[in-house]
Image (tube, rainbow, N blue to C red):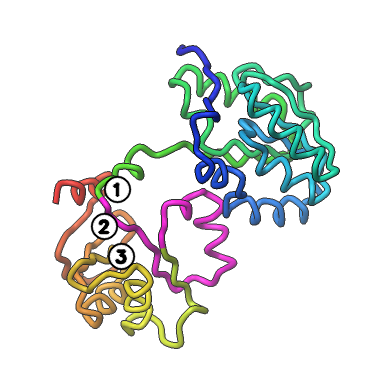
Amino acid sequence: MIESKPWEWSKLNEEGQKKWKEPSIESYYLINRWKKQNKKDFLDIGCGLGRHTIQFAKKGFNVNSIDLSEEAIKTTKEWLEKEGLKANVKKSDMIQLPYKKESIDCILCRNVISHTDTEGIKIIIEQIYNILRKDGECFLTLGSKNAETFKNKKIKQAIVSSKLREQYEIDIISKGIDQYMEAVILQDDTTFHKPHPEPLLKCIEKLNLKPEEVIYIGDAQSDYEASKNAHIDFGLAKWGSVATQEIPATLVFKQPKDLLRLLKK
């Protein structure tokens, strides 16, 4: 197992530090969800500069926070004092969580455990499972190297869906997928819906792209027809398709990893 090392926050410029003080989009969903479930004891694993520690403390949770960086701990404590808030903030390694068995209701562990290797990840998950109460929940994400590669290739990702916003929160935000999207168009964002081209056209307008620069990936006949009506290439996601008829497509993706072929273009 690789040795745990603290993040060097001092290397970030002012703009970078500002970004890491803004709560993630999914944290708002988690607060609402866990409030409805009457969860109180919250743990922020890898609290960084304190963005979620502050956010959850303001919402009345009993907040516990850990980070391996002394600078992060100092910054978080100073921010708490400035806001007049309280939280139990400790310097600690996530592979040895300093909490009693079944003492935590809810945990946020966002893009943190990917800083270790497979052996370390197994240990951390075991630790999390040990301290969570039987009805507890952990929101855990791994940083995706492939997602960053898409960004590096200047490939913009977006979602166009007929889902209602509440369902989108369950399917997308709760899994942390939304952080990679530069635009989202849902059912209540347009007057007309697929197979009408309005949702796709509105999306590419937000992305500042032309139809010929876009491929829309879907798994239904209505997705194909919407693409055709918007004059956009269509990619068929075979792994999610329940279509009973053959759907024409510019590209066919049999499994999610096949999407990486787009990087070679």
- How dense is the environment of label 1, judged by Cα within 10 Å: few (below 14), some, or many (20 and up)? some
Identity of the residue furthest to the bottom in this view: 191
**Along the viewing direction, whichever of 17 and 239 lies nearer the viewer:** 17
- Residue that appears at 58% across and 26% down: 125
Mark 3 or mark 1: name the one nearer the start of the chain. Answer: 1
Q: CA distance from mark 3 to mark 2?
A: 9 Å
Residue 44 vertical position relative to residue 239 in the rendered view, above or below:
above
**Along the viewing direction, whichever of 206 and 171 lies nearer the viewer:** 206
Q: Within the image, what quadrant is residue 86 found in?
A: top right
Residue 132 in the image: x percent, y percent? 72, 31
Q: Is residue 246 visible?
A: no
**Along the viewing direction, whichever of 151 and 188 lies nearer the viewer:** 151
Residue linked to disc 1: 150
Which amino acid, by three-letter code, is at mark 2? Lys
Which mark identifies residue 238? 2
Residue 251 in the image: x percent, y percent? 16, 60
Q: Which residues are magenta?
A: 154-182
Looking at the rendered image, the disc whose residue lies closer to the viewer, 3 or 1, is 1
Mark 3 or mark 2: name the one nearer the start of the chain. Answer: 3
Residue linked to disc 3: 218
Mark 1 or mark 2: name the one nearer the start of the chain. Answer: 1
User: Secondary structure beneath disc 3?
Assistant: strand
User: Secondary structure beneath disc 1?
Assistant: helix
Residue 61 covered by magenta stretch: no
Residue 207 vertical position relative to residue 189 in the rendered view, above or below:
above
Which amino acid, by three-letter code, is at mark 3? Gly
Which amino acid, by three-letter code, is at mark 1? Phe
Q: Evaluate if marks 3 and 2 touch, with contact meaning CB atoms under 8 Å apart.
A: no
Residue 180 covered by magenta stretch: yes
- How dense is the environment of label 3, judged by Cα within 10 Å: few (below 14), some, or many (20 and up)? many
